[in-house]
Image: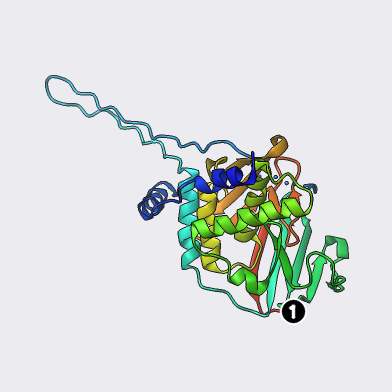
Amino acid sequence: MDDVKMLGILLATPDPSRDAFDRGRHQLQETIRRPVRRHRAAWLGAGIGLTAAAAATVVASVITAPTPAPSRPHAAARPSSQQILLAAANSAAQAPAGSGTYWYVKTVISDSPSDHWETWTKRDGETWLVGAKTGGKIFKLPSPPPNQHPRPGHFVLGGAEVSFEQLSRLPTGTAALKTWIVTNAAEHGSKYGGPTSNPIFVREATFDALTALVSDLPAPPKVRAAAFRVMATLPGVQSIGPVKGGQGLLISLIGGQQARLVVDPATSRVRDTNFFVTSDGGEFWVFPSTASATIIAEWTNRPPK
């Protein structure tokens, strides 16, 4: 399959209409009213989203005086992956834009709270790190050589190196952001010898980029919202229903691995995951399957201490 056909496949999925957006949000609000441990690995699959239906209640009657039959509670309908992601997109779009001196990211592994790390990054690229492997001491990371990828103050998104400023200017339209990510993923594969004619490679690189945008990169609210909407158009994202922290999503990837994301649609936050993408574009898998990572990412004026 050539690059043109590949891009056609990935870009042909229609974006959700405004009606679908509002309908998904309403249905999700109606159905959501209630409530996963370590290792490192590194690269990105498909399936089909499923939706469960609610059960019906049957009422019996007799010929003479009607006798009401005991009613059974309706089974809660499981929101589809698209409903969850569109509701999260709506919440992200309405969130206030953050500001601060540092972009702060804290990652904690659920089965070992002592296994954690925190980073503070300024717009000029100065970065501080503290974690279990630093003995609780804060280290200022040395600036890498100018030819290192990425450069100070830059991140990797879809294979492309982007700065704070470039992240703030990413497309906020669903189709436009999808095109930007897919195009850069294909170019990245070509530059580094990857299989750019393989749609699976590009799809997974696209999923990598979207995961980074919604979980740990300093993307503005409207860009995060667009990333959730793009994710809602991708094949292979399945709802697993309510779980602790929000709604669970399951994504089947290359090699049989399955990424789990727990999204809180009300806040648009990724509360739990067994898979995330670091700021330099590397994949991080948490093992065993019962483990997960919690990521807090936000702007702050609090200095490293």
The extreme left residue here reads 64
Give above or below for 45 relative to 270: above
* 247 left or right of 107 in image: left
Query: Would you say residue 231 is visible in this rendering?
Result: yes
The extreme top residue here reads 63
Image-quadrant location for residue 104: bottom right
Going 79% across and 70% down the picture, which residue do you hit? Answer: 151
* 216 left or right of 134 in image: left
Going 52% across and 59% down the picture, which residue do you hit? Answer: 176
Going 46% across and 37% down the picture, which residue do you hit? Answer: 51
Location of residue 135 in the rendering, given as x and y in whole percent from the top left corner: 88, 65
User: Mark 1, residues whose alpha carbon is within 10 Å: few (<14), some, or many (≥20)?
Assistant: few
Q: Nearer the viewer, residue 59 or 204?
A: 204
Going 40% across and 36% down the picture, which residue do you hit? Answer: 75
> What residue sits right under mark 1 in the picture?
124
SS for dot 1: loop
Location of residue 61 in the rendering, given as x and y in whole percent from the top left corner: 19, 23
* 236 left or right of 184 in image: left
Tell me the quarter of the image containing the C terminus: bottom right
Tell me the quarter of the image containing the N terminus: top right
Give above or below for 258 relative to 170: above
Q: How many labels does the image show?
A: 1
Query: Would you say residue 268 is visible in this rendering?
Result: no
Location of residue 8 in the rendering, given as x and y in whole percent from the top left corner: 55, 46
What's the colour scheme? rainbow
Q: What residue type is labelled 1?
A: Asp
Q: Which of 177 and 125 is in front in this view?
A: 177
